[in-house]
Amino acid sequence: MTWFRRLLRIDLTRQQATVEEIPTAFIEAFVGGKGLGTYYLYREIDPRVDPLGTENKVFIAPGALNGTLTPAASRYEMVTGSPLTGLYLDCNAGGHFGPELKLTGHDLLILEGQSPQPVALVIEGDVVQFRPASHLWGRSIYETETALRAELGDPRFRIASIGPAGERLVKFACVSNDYSRQIGRGGLGAVFGAKRVKAIAVRGTRTLPVADPDAFMDAVDAALRHIFENPWVPHKREHGTIGSLDDNHTLGIVPVYNFTRSVFEGIDRVDSTVFGKLVEARLACAVCPVACSKGTRWRGGSESDGIEGPEYETAALLGLNCLVDDPQDIIHANLLCNQAGMDTISAGVVVGMVLAAVDESLISWDELGLSLDMSRGEMVTRLLERIARREGVGDLLAEGARAAGEALGFPDLAPQVKGLEFPAYDPRVSPGMALAYMTSDRGACHLRSYPFGREVSGVLPWFSLEQKAEFVKRQQDEKAAQECLGVCQFPYGIGLLTDDLPNLLSAASGEEWSYERLCAVGERIWNLSRAFNAQLGVDRRADYLPRRFSEVPMPDGMGAGQALSRADQDWLLDRYYCLRGWDDRGLPTPETWEQLGLAGFAPLPTH
């Protein structure tokens, strides 16, 4: 139970779809979601293929608990080769698309080849329609989903689509479902654009019975009780993720002015209280008891110009990081990214980088197409529009911070690891977050492990290196397992694989799942993704922060004077590699591969 053990393979070139069986051994080893997607990527893709070429594939995998009554089981995964980093990429989103995809009767959807013309895939059970979508090409996310929904004439369809940024192959274009839920990082929208997939609409035609209904409902009740007892949940329900902005600014970790400082004089104009007064709706993903999403509206637009957010990352990176202190400007920037289909994290870092560069006379105002008499908010929106259209300097900026910084002559200004832009946490202020960025399988990421909360609460020593490698490694394994289940991290605690989730999976599947068994799944995933990246040259040399974050201390705030030296980074990496069972280059050893049971599924490449 809880698996259909079927995948749907869609050949875009030939406009054909076939159903294949997923062997039980694959499910037992990799479960679903990130696990199944990562394994099939490793199994079917040469890492050296062009991410925007026809040989790349997209693996779309609902979580094992999607389609059940598991609280907050709304998230599904996409796995592919990233056009932004050139490396392994997985990303997930909430909303309602994932559970609906699961109820079509498939645990995995594989997109391969390239459609000869723009296409919208419509999936009802095993029936797949390849609907011409040239009339949707060029339309925004909102326009696309609204138009396709009207054409289908059935409100039960859930839709994922790309906007103009994905069509123009912006390297950090995203895929959006349910209007405002983003598969945001690493450029999956560009992969869709290269394959000429404008949208996917899914409608479930099946039910998903659980193996032991009584035990499952007992586990659901226990999970709900624990969620409501979590002291963090009421704050998340009331304020959403943006509620972290004030505290994180006080703690000195929010990036200001391209990650050069942590104190923002205009914080009282864009804090969570200000945004809280602009909330018009409270929104929830499928089967979620928290409803952390908040609906706001850009007052300079039309009735349709609403967004879910801004979230913490968006407000921090398109706001403080760009020196924008008007909440309406931040909402407008968020709206532009949502409609064009662009990751607000990468967009905020790229724009913040070039605005800092022009202030330092490393690039001219004319080159950016800006003038000094513009407000900071107008500068940001102008640059976002140019990026989405690949117009002028926007064509370079659409390649991402690393590539743009190198091309424009200021590579040291780019806050990134392995080509993926930093989220809204300055790693100098948190050795744990620094290590999480350094070792993340997709590049700088705060969602693989989040040690900062434990550091500032005293569970971990804040500025010390001690215990950080152990914590990061454990949370990475836990989070990978959680992403196999399709369960949102917020209600259950960030990255913590509580007893609730093994109990829920055991009752749903009829098999015994423990914390240890699920963590072993997480370890397999981390070793697969590392081995995939190793074939592209990733080793210890790729696992460092940019130089300025080790050489230039934080100038202000609670982290004043902090930086993570190269020697400190080496100490953390040595400890982390040892815990992972990797060699001193940061590569999986044959012994580790064998111990995790991977030898029976895939070869370990020679490094």
Image: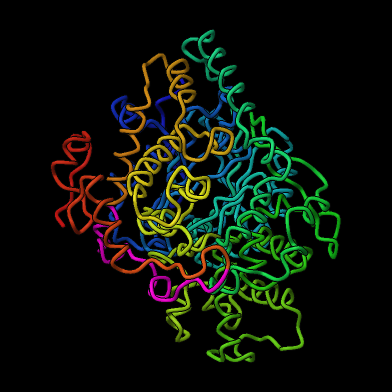
Asked if residue 105 lies in the magenta stretch, the reply is: no
Q: Quadrant of the C terminus?
A: bottom left
Residue 14 visible here: no
Left or right of 606? Residue 244 is: right
Which residue shows up at 72% across the image and 88% down it? 372
Residue 490 occupies which quadrant of the picture?
top right
Image coordinates for residue 499, horizontal then vertical, percent: 45, 23
- Decide: is 455 above or below 485: below
- Left or right relative to 446: residue 269: right
Q: Nearer the viewer, residue 464 or 10?
A: 464
| Residue 606 horizontal/vertical position (percent) | 14, 54
Pinpoint residue 196: horizontal percent, then vertical percent.
Answer: 52, 57
Q: How many numbered dots are placed on residues in this image?
A: 0
- Decide which of 289, 249 is in the foreground and name it: 249
Magenta range = 532-556
Foreground of the two, 115 or 362: 362
Residue 378 vertical position relative to residue 497 in the rendered view, above or below: below
Q: Which residue is rendered at x = 65% and y = 55% of the image?
A: 245
Does 555 appear in magenta? yes
Q: Position of residue 408 (x, y in %)?
A: 48, 85
